[in-house]
Amino acid sequence: MNKKGIIALILVALIATFTALAHLSCIFLGPSCYKAQLAPSEIIQSAIDGTFLAPVSTVVISALFLLCAVFAVSGAGFIKKLPLLKPVLITISGLCLVRGIVTIPFSFLFPEMVSTFSIVAGFIWFLSGILYLYGFIHVRSSGS
């Protein structure tokens, strides 16, 4: 695998890890953090009410982001090759690309939800999808 593939996967692992930490910060910072990160209203209400839905769902979502980071690090060759590495990397890439692309039509369908944060988040999702795809291509081409 070439250095560019490794860099792409490490960069996306850092993005996924930062995203997980940003989500986890909501547990400590409270309802305003959930609102700022555009959480669904049920999650925001749970944070206001102090029920378990908000923190539990936040931990689950953060764990998924960390799992994505682990697969990226594995694809980069820094840890043991995980089972199903290639199909998982391509699936993560596809999901990120779709999530990034839907930002555009959703901005027209739900203009009240459009903010600088939502546009930047959509761009980061799309960029992450490109990085996963680029890394996947180099993982596949290296015979790993």
Image (cartoon, rainbow, N blue to C red):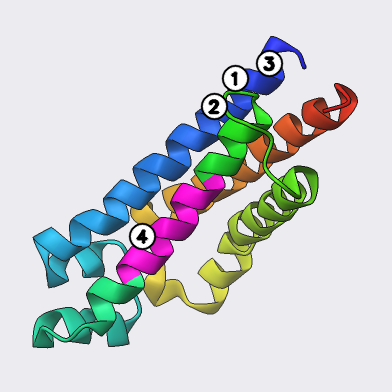
The residue labelled by disc 1 is 7
- The tag earlier along the polypeptide, 4 or 1, is 1
* Mark number displayed over residue 115: 4
Circle 1/circle 3 CB separation < 8 Å: yes
Q: Quadrant of residue 33?
A: bottom left
N-terminal-most mark, 3 or 4: 3
Of callouts 4 and 2, which one flags the residue occurring earlier in the amino acid sequence? 2
In the image shown, does 142 or 130 lie closer to the viewer? 142
Label 3 vs label 4, nearer the camera: 3
Q: Which residues are magenta?
A: 58-68
Q: Does the segment drawn in magenta span residue 27?
A: no
- Measure the alpha-carbon separation of dots 3 and 4: 33 Å
In terms of secondary structure, where does tag 2 sit?
Answer: helix
Q: State the SS at label 3.
A: helix
Q: Is residue 134 above or below residue 59?
A: above
Q: Position of residue 103 (x, y in %)?
A: 56, 61
In the rendered structure, does residue 65 fall within the stretch colored magenta? yes
Which quarter of the figure is the C terminus placed in? top right
- Cα–Cα span, label 4 and label 2: 28 Å
Q: Is residue 38 visible?
A: no
Q: Gap in Å between the C-alphas at discs 2 and 1?
A: 5 Å
Q: Type of residue at label 3?
A: Lys
Name the residue carrying label 2: 10
For mark 2, does the 10 Å Cα neighbourhood hold few (<14), some (14 to 19), or many (20 or more) residues? many
Q: Is 4 above or below relative to 91? A: above
Residue bearing the label numbered 3: 4
Pinpoint residue 31: horizontal percent, then vertical percent: 14, 72
